[in-house]
Amino acid sequence: MNTSTLLRASACAILGLSASAACALDPLSYANYDQVRTRALHLDLKADFTKKTLAGHAELSLDWLDTSARRLDLDTRDLAISKVEAIDTRGRWTPVKYTQGKFDAEKGQALHIDLPAQAPKVRIHYRTAPTASALQWLSPAQTLSGKRPFMFSQSQAINARSWVPVQDTPSVRFTYSARIEAPEGLRVVMSADNDPKATGRGGWKFTMPQPIPSYLLAIGIGELETRTLGGRTGVYAEPGRIDAAAYELADTEKMVAAAESLYGPYRWGRYDMLVLPPSFPIGGMENPRLTFLTPTMIAGDRSLVDLIAHELAHSWSGNLVTNASWKHWWLNEGFTTYVTTRILEVLYGEEVATMNLQLEQEEAIESLKDLAPGKQALVTRDPDTGSATYTDEGLAYPKGAWLLRTLEQRAGRAVFDPFLRGWFDTHAFQSVTTDRFVAYLRTNLLAKHPQVMSDSELDEWLYGPGIPKSAQYAKSQRLVALDATTAAWLKGTLPTAKLDTKNWTANEWMKFLNDIDNKADAARLKELDSAFGLAKTRNNEVAFRFYRAAVHAGYRDIRPQLQAFLNSVGRQKFVVPLYAALRANAEDRVWAENIYKAARERYHPETQSSVDKQMAAATTK
């Protein structure tokens, strides 16, 4: 074994990774973390809403793994670097040389810091760009009250580098602290220990004592109030939304206890949540100690709290045990989706959990129609060379969960639950690969219970397309009964007026609308709308599915409500498919383009990028 290989093996061991080829460096990062890695980060930044920038410095405490290394390579994107300093042998901050590499559209720029000696700390003075891909700066008009501006971050997957110069890879974990200055009257919150009694005098101060990867760095600044939900849970939101948020999230403390009963202690101290303005592009982001949430989950009846269960579940799968690179995304999201169902079952019973699971599986099967076979695997055997070779992100959630559920069903919970808890316990605060999980699975489950799954079937789940034929489908008795109702309604033998929906859950409405999509005409959609006011529902999951079915059916009476929805909701899960449906029909295309022109500035940069690509692709046909 040569010196380079020995160094790589040593680095892998420290990082909690296998010393095999699976420990190849993350191709989406410029960082040389096999030679040096960040142990701690301190941020001292000032937020300027006029310039839409954060400016100040980042201080990195370093552990050197290679005794001969003298260079620190970091990830950046559109950062204006003004100075870099390092601690010299006398303990003084001394300027050092640095260069920035060629810009790459996906990865940004490498920051190369040349050091005369292995410094324990470096300090980078910088300013973010107004167009930083992780940050959205909202004007007062884009907030609920219309009085004060708002800013929030979304660092996942590789956008942390657009607001902090870091080793932006999930393979590197570090603790952090911060001091943030913000305009008077605005509260700063971070994915750290938030003090609800803090005033911001002298800057807002934070500590994160548990080591996290860079994608979990998060910040929010705005007009915020807080409510306590339980002994270790709370919620932050804009003043006009705080009461509704506190009501919707009232079961959070119970969710934490339910998860602990299955998978061991919650290791992050508090579990708080921040409900963001509507432009937040995703449902939730599992930032430790402060989950970020879309307001679209506030339905007024707690019917969409599975989203909270999912983000909480990340406290074990993802935040605690993290995919080593984004190739292994399913280790975060597939595991979390499985854990979510188990939490829901403890809290709300088997039938509710099974309904949620069946809908999840049906939507996964439906999604296969639009995915190339090569994208349908959980992970590929190809070398980890870049995102172009990665499999579909969306399918990883249900398919990964389906694999774990299959193992659970065959081994039995008495065997599988201790196995899964052991995975979390023995790999806590580590970054792992699929190979690492497979080795653990074979040693701790399959070697003792070989009948659970053969090597060939495991390979089919991991590397094959679609869902294996051996998969067992979830069947909710309520949803089975709903199938008969839906079929009768579509045939016309069950009039709309006779649909008995008074006890339907949100999941039943979602399944019904999924199943009639592209099958019911405009007249039938109008009947449903007249009878049940679906175009005005407060449940955004139901509203989205109704609007999508209405667009496909050519039911245009709902255009005012659909326009209001697209103007007020920025969640990509809803926005992107609705624009796609509208663009597919010539009669709706111009209307959709005009709506998007007006609504675009309200969307997060990630959402803008998705819809921009869609619009550009559609116009070339």
Image: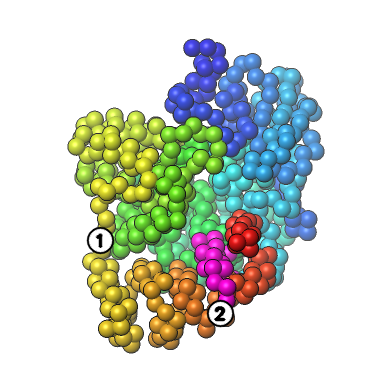
Q: Provide the residue span drawn in magenta.
A: 567-587
Residue 187 seen in this snapshot: no
Please name the residue shown 44% across and 44% down the image. Answer: 374
Disc 2 residue type?
Arg
> Which quadrant of the structure image shows residue 509?
bottom left
Tell me the CA gap for discs 2 and 1: 36 Å
Give the tally of numbered discs. Answer: 2
Question: Taken as a whole, is the magenta stretch helix, strand or loop?
Answer: helix
Residue 485 is left or right of residue 199, and the answer is: left
Category of crowding for the residue at label 2, using alpha-carbon neighbours closer than 10 angstroms: few (below 14), some (14–19), many (at least 20) = some
- Image disc number at residue 559: 2
> Which quadrant of the structure image shows residue 77?
top right
Front label number (2 vs 1)? 2
User: Helix, strand or loop at disc 1?
Assistant: loop
Disc 1 residue type?
Lys
Residue extending farthest to the top is 2
Residue 522 vs residue 40, the one in the foreground? 522
Rendering coords of residue 491 (x, y %): 30, 79
Please name the residue shown 20% across and 35% down the image. Answer: 449
Residue 274 is left or right of residue 364, and the answer is: right
Position of the C terminus by quadrant: bottom right
Please name the residue shown 50% across and 74% down the image. Answer: 551
Rendering coords of residue 365 (x, y %): 36, 56
Judge whether residue 560 is colored magenta. Answer: no
Mark before the other along the chain sequence, 2 or 1: 1
Which residue was labeled with disc 1? 475
Residue 587 is left or right of residue 313, and the answer is: right
